[in-house]
Every structure is written in C-alpha cells, then in structure tokens.
C-alpha cells in the first residue's frame, strides 16, 4: 500500500485533491478518522469521491455509497461510530468488476486526479485528532478498461415514474438504496432486461453477493453473465420505478470504459518488469522453472504494437 496524501479535514477547506503517482494499482483507498464533539456522532456520509483522467471524469459518487458497495460485494468495511468519541471509516475503489485482474495503470504521461469534496455537516462535528488518507494498493497486471461509477438522484413521485439516463457507457450494473421502490422496469437500448418486484431484486442481490444475512443498505442489479464482461455498447438507459411514496433514491450506474491503447501500454510495462525480474534471478543462479526460464519473452520481449485510433461511429 502507498499513501498518496494525508490531511486534517477540519482545516483542509471544502475539498482535497491528489495526483496519483505513476504505477499499477488494484484499488484506491480512503480512510477517515476523527474524534467527534460532545453529544455528536460523525456519520459515514463524509463527502464525495471524484476521479478525473486527463480531464475526463470517470467516477463521481458519495463515500457512504462506496462503503455500502464494498460491504455488499466484499468484506466488512471499517465503520466506527461513537457519540462524542472516535468515528472511523474506510472505503475501497476497485479497478476491476468481477474479474479481479484488471488494474489501474497510471503512466508517466497520465494525469489521474482523485478529488474528495467534504460534507461540511459532518466535518463541523470534529473535535480533534482528525485525519483523512488517500492511497493506493499496488498490484501487477494489465488494464483493459476503466470501471466508471456515477451517482444520480432522481425525484420520484408516488406511483410510476419513468426516468431516462443517457450516455451511461457500457452499463454492467445498477446499485440503488430505497425502501419505497416496489417495482423496477429497466430497458437498455430499447430492450427490456429487468421487470421485477423490488423484493425479488433485493433477495437475488443478497444471494448473488453471498450475504449471510439480509442486507438492505444497497441493492445491485447485475447485467452481466457470470464473470464475463463484453463490450456492451449501451448508451441509453430507461428505468420505470413504481413507488409507494415520493422519494429521492440514490442510484449508482456502474459502467465499463474500454481502453485498448492503455491495454497495450500496461501489457508492455508488465512484460518488461517480468523479464527484468526473471533475468535477475537467472543472473543470481536462482532455480527457475523451465517453462518460465525458456519463455520467448525472456530472450527478447516483443512489445505489442499500439493500435490505431478507431474512427468515430456514424
């Protein structure tokens, strides 16, 4: 793990930002820790995470929603709440969706910036000893895509509310947290892919994410099959909610932004690192399996040619 930046939120202003150093990461992590004022409890809605790649935003969602997604899909995230005492929270932003092999590859010529906008309502409750850390978990691998995450908050009326969300690129899943939703009809590029009662969706979400007890902080509609991620080229999402009351649910659209040029760059970087490590071991006389020592890339690694930019779709 590598700490990128540590600040004191009570004196950091409205936001914190950090430029991610070149490297390969499986996750970015966020950790908040502070003592709350007397009779106050700092809750997990401490702010919003944004990820910007070379001027293009690819992640924009609240910290507490990311924590709920972590809890649904992975292990229990740190969430300590003490009135007038220590309040601590940790969340992870993964590079992958299901496959666990995709990474964040940040090259020397990239500018990947993490922004965190604080929720002043919670920050004002800080008494002392506050810190907020942003960092990355180093990994080895190749990057095929960026996992995009965007939060939307529609205004739903009591009854049926059709909502259209455009430019959600290659949607693979939808997360939502709302107890007043009773049914969801979902169309992707004109094709109905979900038409079910909320209780059924919630039950299936808990089963597929292997929850050992009923989980109601957030639910997930998975649009992929198994662990496969294809180029789903979806660009228009229409959702019709049936609700028992007016409400403003949190929706998180999880998409995949494919990047063939980054795959080439990350693959070449991975092969070069791999070759150097094996050559060092060979030079030291270390025992190495024959299938590794005699692999073609050890003798003369061949960089993968950079693909030509694809013409725009018409």
Image (cartoon, rainbow, N blue to C red):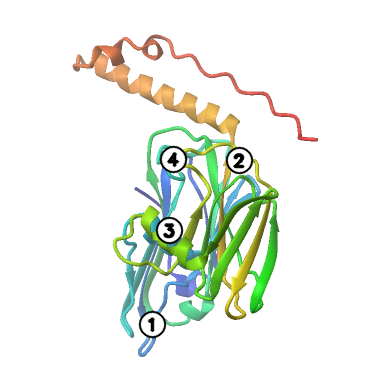
Which of disc 3 and disc 4 is earlier in sequence? 3
Q: Residue at the spot x=42%, y=40% of the render?
A: 99
Q: CA distance from mark 1 to mark 4?
A: 40 Å
Choose mark 1 or mark 4, whichever is in front.
4
From the image, tell me which residue sits under label 4.
227
**Dot 1 crowding, Cα within 10 Å, few <14, some 14–19, many 20+:** many
Whether residues under marks 4 and 2 lie with C-beta atoms below 8 angstroms apart, the answer is no
Q: CA distance from mark 4 to mark 3?
A: 15 Å
**Dot 3 crowding, Cα within 10 Å, few <14, some 14–19, many 20+:** many
Q: Position of residue 52 (x, y in %)?
A: 59, 51
* Residue 211 location, quadrant: bottom left
Between 169 and 140, which is closer to the camera in this rendering?
169
Which of disc 1 and disc 3 is earlier in sequence? 1
From the image, tell me which residue sits under label 3.
205
Q: Which quarter of the image is occupied by the C terminus?
A: top right
Q: Which mark is residue 41?
A: 1
User: Given the current orientation, which residue lies at the most extreme right position?
Assistant: 314
Q: Position of residue 207 (x, y in %)?
A: 37, 56
SS state under label 1: loop
Q: Residue at the spot x=49%, y=35% of the render?
A: 143
SS state under label 4: loop
Q: Residue at the spot x=48%, y=38% of the render?
A: 228
Relative to 199, 33 lies left or right: left
Q: Residue at the spot x=47%, y=71% of the render?
A: 46
Between 162 and 143, which is closer to the camera in this rendering?
162
Choose mark 3 or mark 1, whichever is in front.
3
SS state under label 2: loop
From the image, tell me which residue sits under label 2.
232
Q: Is residue 133 visible?
A: no
């Amino acid at each position: 793990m590598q700490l990128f930046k540590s600040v004191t939120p009570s004196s950091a202003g409205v936001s914190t930002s950090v430029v991610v150093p070149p490297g390969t990461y499986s996750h970015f992590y966020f950790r908040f820790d502070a003592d709350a004022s007397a009779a106050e409890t700092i809750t997990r809605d401490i702010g919003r995470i944004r990820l910007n790649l070379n001027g293009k935003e690819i992640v924009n969602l609240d910290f507490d929603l990311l924590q709920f997604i972590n809890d649904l899909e992975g292990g229990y995230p740190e969430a300590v709440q003490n009135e007038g005492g220590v309040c601590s929270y940790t969340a992870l932003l993964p590079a992958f969706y299901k496959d666990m092999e995709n990474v964040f590859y940040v090259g020397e010529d990239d500018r990947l910036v993490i922004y965190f906008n604080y929720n002043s309502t919670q920050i004002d409750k800080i008494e002392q000893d506050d810190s907020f850390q942003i960092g990355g978990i180093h990994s080895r691998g190749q990057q095929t895509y960026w996992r995009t995450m965007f939060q939307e908050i529609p205004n739903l009326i009591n009854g049926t509310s059709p909502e259209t969300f455009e430019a959600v690129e290659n949607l693979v899943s939808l997360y939502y947290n709302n107890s007043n939703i009773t049914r969801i009809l979902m169309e992707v590029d004109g094709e109905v892919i979900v038409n079910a009662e909320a209780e059924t969706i919630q039950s299936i979400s808990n089963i597929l994410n292997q929850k050992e007890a009923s989980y109601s902080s957030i639910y997930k509609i998975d649009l992929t099959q198994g662990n496969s991620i294809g180029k789903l080229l979806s660009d228009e999402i229409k959702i019709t909610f049936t609700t028992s009351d007016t409400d403003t649910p949190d929706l998180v659209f999880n998409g995949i932004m494919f990047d063939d040029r980054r795959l080439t760059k990350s693959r070449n970087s991975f092969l070069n690192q791999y070759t150097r490590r094996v050559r060092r071991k060979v030079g030291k006389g270390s025992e190495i399996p024959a299938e590794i020592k005699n692999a073609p890339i050890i003798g003369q690694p061949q960089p993968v040619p950079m693909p030509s930019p694809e013409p725009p779709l018409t």
